[in-house]
Image: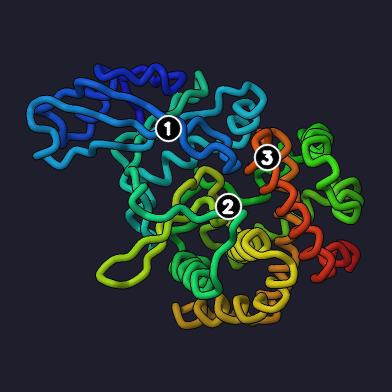
C-alpha cells in the first residue's frame, strides 16, 4: 500500500508516535494513542533474513478495551547490507506485504492478522506489523516433529494449494513471480553465495552435497523453469517447521503459517520437499516419506485437483530437491549461522539434503 508515513529503517525507529499513526491508518485505533513501545528481538538462530522483533505496547484512551493488541510482531528488511541487497533484488518484502494485503484472507490456512504494512521501492524500506501468536508453539526445524504433526502439516499444504491449482485467480497475482523469474538473480549471485555457505558450514558440509553444488549453477534455468511449468499453484517458498505455529482451536490441532516473503507461483511439491527434507533425519525420512507423499497427493485429489498423477507428483518432488539446494545456497549463503542453534540447523540441513538428493537420484534428472 502507499503511505504518507515514513517507513522506519530499523526496529529502533518504531516510536510510540509512529506506531499511533500506523495503527490509526487502518481504522480501529482512531481514538487511542500508543504511550509506550518496547521491543525484543525474536527468531535468532532460525534462519530469518529480516529484522524481527516483538513489540510490547501500551495505550491511552482504552486501547485494550477496543481490542488493540498488547504485543505484535514487527518485521523489517535486514540491517545487513548484503542480505538487504539480495532480498531487494528478489522483491521479497513487496511480495510479503502484498500477500497480507491481497491474499491472506483468501487462502485455506491460518495466517497472522496484519495490522499495518508498507513498502517503499525507492528506499528499499518495508514494514509489517502482524499478530503475535506466541501463545502457540513455534515449530523447530532442529528438533523436528512427530509423524502425526507431519501428516497435519502435509494435509494443510494440500488444502492450501488445491484451490489455486491452475486457477485463473492465480494468474492475476502477477506481483507473485514464477519461480523462473528469479533465475537470473540466482545465476548472478550463485558463485559468491556458494563460497560463503561452504565456508560457514565448514566440516558440516557433506562432500557429496558439495560436489553437486559446485556443478549446479549452469542448470539453474532448467531447474527453476521446470518448477514454473503448469500445473502451478501458490508456493509458500520456505515451508519449514521454523515458519509454522502449532496450536488448537475448539479441541482440534491447528497450524498457522507465517513468513511469506518467498511466495511464488509454481509446482507445489517444492513446499513438500522443503518440509520433509528439513523435518527429519535421513533414516526417519526414508521410513515415512512415501506415506507423506501419498497423503499429499491424495489430499490434492480430494480437494479437486485433476490430471495430476502420483508418478508426476513424485517426479516433481525429485526436481524440487535440487531447487531447494539452490535456494539454500543463494539465500542461505548470506544468512548468519553464528550461534550454536543456527550452526546445528545448518549442519543438520546439509546432511539431510545430501541424503535426500542421493536417495532420489535428483541429479540424474538433469541428464534425462
In the shown orientation, is residue 140 left or right of residue 330? left
Classify the position of the C terminus by image quarter: bottom right
Instruction: State whether residue 318 is above or below residue 343.
Output: below
SS class, disc 2: loop
SS class, disc 3: helix
> What residue lies at 62% left-to-right and 76% top-to-bottom?
293
Task: Between residue 165 and residue 254, name the one nearer to us.
Answer: 254
In the shown orientation, is residue 114 left or right of residue 94? left
Q: Position of residue 249 (x, y in %)?
A: 28, 66
Per the image, the residue denoted by label 3 is 331
In the shown orientation, is residue 29 left or right of residue 342? left
Disc with the residue nearer the chain's start (1 vs 3): 1
Per the image, the residue denoted by label 2 is 237
Classify the position of the N terminus by image quarter: top left
> What residue lies at 32% left-to-right and 72% top-to-bottom?
252
Instruction: State whether residue 164 is above or below residue 337.
Output: below
Task: Between residue 346 and residue 159, name the one nearer to us.
Answer: 346
Task: Between residue 224 and residue 127, name the one nearer to us.
Answer: 127
Colour scheme:
rainbow
Disc with the residue nearer the chain's start (2 vs 3): 2
Could you classify mark 1 by the number of other residues whose Cα lies within 10 Å: few (under 14), some (14-19), or many (20 or more)? many
Q: How far apart are the alpha carbons under marks 2 and 3?
A: 12 Å
Q: Quadrant of residue 81?
A: top right
Could you classify mark 2 by the number of other residues whose Cα lies within 10 Å: few (under 14), some (14-19), or many (20 or more)? many
Q: Which residue is situated farthest in the front direction here?
A: 340
Could you classify mark 3 by the number of other residues whose Cα lies within 10 Å: few (under 14), some (14-19), or many (20 or more)? many
Q: Position of residue 49 (x, y in %)?
A: 58, 36
Give the number of the mark in front: 1 or 3. 1
> What residue lies at 36% left-to-right and 17% top-to-bottom?
6
Amino acid at each position: 500500500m502507499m503511505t504518507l508515513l515514513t517507513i522506519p529503517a530499523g526496529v529502533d525507529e518504531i516510536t510510540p508516535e509512529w506506531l499511533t499513526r500506523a495503527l490509526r491508518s487502518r481504522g480501529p485505533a482512531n481514538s487511542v494513542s500508543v504511550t509506550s513501545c518496547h521491543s525484543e528481538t525474536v527468531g535468532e538462530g532460525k534462519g530469518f533474513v529480516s529484522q524481527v522483533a516483538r513489540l510490547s505496547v501500551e495505550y491511552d484512551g482504552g486501547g485494550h478495551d477496543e481490542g488493540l493488541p498488547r504485543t505484535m510482531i514487527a518485521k523489517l528488511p535486514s540491517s545487513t547490507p548484503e542480505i538487504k541487497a539480495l532480498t531487494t533484488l528478489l522483491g521479497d518484502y513487496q511480495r510479503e506485504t502484498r500477500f497480507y494485503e491481497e491474499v491472506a484472507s483468501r487462502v485455506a490456512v491460518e495466517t497472522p492478522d496484519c495490522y499495518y504494512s508498507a513498502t517503499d521501492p525507492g528506499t528499499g524500506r518495508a514494514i509489517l506489523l502482524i499478530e503475535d501468536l506466541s501463545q502457540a508453539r513455534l515449530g523447530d526445524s532442529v528438533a523436528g516433529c512427530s509423524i502425526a504433526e507431519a501428516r497435519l502439516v502435509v494435509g494443510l499444504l494440500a488444502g492450501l494449494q488445491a484451490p489455486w491449482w491452475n486457477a485463473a485467480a492465480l494468474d492475476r497475482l502477477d506481483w507473485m513471480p514464477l519461480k523462473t523469474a528469479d533465475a537470473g538473480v540466482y545465476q548472478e549471485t550463485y558463485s559468491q553465495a556458494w563460497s560463503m555457505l561452504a565456508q560457514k558450514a565448514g566440516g558440516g558440509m557433506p562432500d557429496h552435497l558439495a560436489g553437486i553444488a559446485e556443478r549446479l549453477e549452469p542448470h539453474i534455468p532448467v531447474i527453476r523453469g521446470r518448477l514454473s511449468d503448469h500445473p502451478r499453484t501458490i508456493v509458500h517458498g520456505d515451508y519449514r517447521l521454523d515458519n509454522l505455529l502449532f496450536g488448537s482451536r475448539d479441541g482440534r490441532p491447528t497450524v498457522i503459517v507465517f513468513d511469506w516473503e518467498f511466495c511464488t507461483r509454481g509446482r507445489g511439491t517444492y513446499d513438500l520437499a522443503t518440509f520433509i527434507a528439513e523435518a527429519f533425519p535421513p533414516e526417519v525420512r526414508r521410513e515415512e516419506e512415501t506415506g507423506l507423499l501419498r497423503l499429499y497427493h491424495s489430499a490434492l485429489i480430494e480437494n479437486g485437483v485433476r490430471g495430476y498423477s502420483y508418478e508426476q507428483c513424485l517426479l516433481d518432488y525429485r526436481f524440487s530437491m535440487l531447487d531447494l539446494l539452490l535456494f539454500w545456497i543463494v539465500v542461505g549463503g548470506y544468512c548468519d549461522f553464528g550461534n550454536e542453534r543456527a550452526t546445528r540447523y545448518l549442519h543438520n540441513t546439509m546432511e539431510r539434503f545430501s541424503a535426500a538428493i542421493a536417495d532420489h537420484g535428483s541429479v540424474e534428472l538433469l541428464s534425462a
